[in-house]
Amino acid sequence: MKRTLLAAALCCALPVLATPGRSTQEIIDTAPADAWRTPNPANLLYMQLDKGTVVFELAPDFAPEHVAQVKLLAQQHFWDGLSVYRVQDNYVAQFGDPNAEDKTKAKPLPPESKALPAEFTRPLAGLAFTALPDKDGWAKQVGFADGFAVANDDKNAWLTHCYGVLGSGRDNPPDSSNGAELYVVIGQSPRYLDRNITLVGRVVHGMELLSSLPRGTNNNAGYAGYYNSPAEYTPIKNIRLGSEVPESERLALQIMKTDSPAFAEMVESRRNRSGDWFVRTAGYTDVCNISVPSRVQR
Amino acid sequence: MKRTLLAAALCCALPVLATPGRSTQEIIDTAPADAWRTPNPANLLYMQLDKGTVVFELAPDFAPEHVAQVKLLAQQHFWDGLSVYRVQDNYVAQFGDPNAEDKTKAKPLPPESKALPAEFTRPLAGLAFTALPDKDGWAKQVGFADGFAVANDDKNAWLTHCYGVLGSGRDNPPDSSNGAELYVVIGQSPRYLDRNITLVGRVVHGMELLSSLPRGTNNNAGYAGYYNSPAEYTPIKNIRLGSEVPESERLALQIMKTDSPAFAEMVESRRNRSGDWFVRTAGYTDVCNISVPSRVQR
């Protein structure tokens, strides 16, 4: 009988490893200190739910105006007391003001809020981009930039819709998002959204608090995943900018540098799996199959 | 203000559609009767959890010996009172006997159980395969066969590790699975598992009951996602073969035929999204971004 089913399929150490590759977990565990960076707390969002803390890292290099608005909203405590009001299976968890659509009930944005442009792409030039050699069906090239999964077409670059990415919902006009109604990808990467909506960051801690929420069953309006009543919402206690969280309450987060040798070795360990469990290695990876490691220093 | 955020990104109808494409939901809603098939109840598994019913369609064309064993286990009520004992975020929910590894506690398999071979691939010849034109990074060709996402290398074919697929855990020897410890993919498709483990079917109803389970936090043994105590397990009330569920309790399930014109049009609607929301269509789809429609006739 066996319990170590799928053992080598995990991100984790195997007791017996075939040469030459080291396991992903071993690479992470032994990565030198300079393979890690401490994210700037001014670029982190701490979201407090009843069951714990979700931390997002924002991406000002990709969506500077959206990120400025998100920071303003956090500083103004806009989301406090609002909720996760939509969770569609294999798609997104969406949070903010459940009454955003109803002008008579919507929570007003801070008066300093500015109209936001569509920030779907940015120039590739000037971006510290590390390419993957692996082909991608959705874009000319994919890789990573400072912890974020990125695609490009030689001229422009954009964040990709991988698991855990944070985006800003919009209406039909491309410039119609206000930075207040955010969504997180909780399923198979919906890459068809790439370059259609502004991505503002990604989850670096506590993802499971969003991905395990009950799915909404109200699909009547043609939009799936909404809850039927406010009683089903997940309340947001508060969302704070990391730099405004008391230091004693901050997590000592570190994120692996995606331009480090350790990360390159880790990607290779995903592309060609080591260990006695695998009978075939793929020799390939999808950019969304690479989870950029983060850790909390204790 | 807006609530219809991400509206067109859904699988669902938009009030205003641009020509020429019809929306995915419109295609599904208007698909003719002959675009649907009623699965053979002898190939369905009904899993009763406290919160509802999960239904799996088994794939005897791909894993005949495993499917025979799974049917035997269901007929013998093997899983009744067992549990979902592992849920790893962005990976799998695994169920069966939490004590499978402990010979002194493990629930004995029925004496009729046979040793199972590795059923990682089958010949492409003889399979009613509908290819996608879209390139795939993991396999020479991908497409569908009778409701299942499939890859092939011109000679052999195999089920792909897309969201909702059902597999049979194994230990290091390729022929070490016993059909009793099963897992369901609940995140980004782990295609690197393809041809390394036997897939036996997929979820066709109630997926959200598995994907929204709390994630296990016991990673101590190097295997992530296990629960720390039996109190965290999700009990399985029972698992029955569809043909042994009383007719009054069966769901009138239908699954879209993946060789039908309606399905082809639906795939095209995912590849090139219609509606006023999209500013760019991908002109591409990943096989795992296509959810084969199923419905319950009322």
Image (tube, coloured by chain):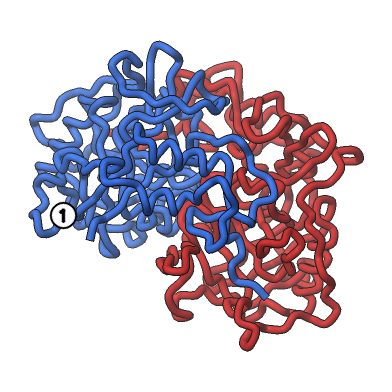
Chain colours: A red, B blue
Q: Nearer the viewer, residue A218 or B23?
A: B23
The chain ID associated with circle 1 is B
Q: Nearer the viewer, residue B110 or B142?
A: B142
**Residue A61 appears at what percent x and percent y?**
84, 51
In this rendering, is residue A199 above or below B286?
below
At a point 50% along the width and 51% down the height, the residue shown is B23
- Horizontally, residue B231 falls left or right of residue A73, namely left
In this rendering, is residue A233 above or below B229?
below
Outermost residue toward the right in this view: A126
At a point 74% along the width and 57% down the height, the residue shown is A200
Q: Nearer the viewer, residue B39 or A250?
A: B39
Outermost residue toward the bottom in this view: A104
At a point 64% along the width and 35% down the height, the residue shown is A138
**Residue B248 appears at what percent x and percent y?**
10, 59
Give the image quarter of residue A78. Answer: bottom right
Name the residue type under label 1: Arg
Q: Nearer the viewer, residue A173 or A219?
A: A173
Residue linked to disc 1 = B250
**Residue B221 appears at what percent x and percent y?**
46, 42
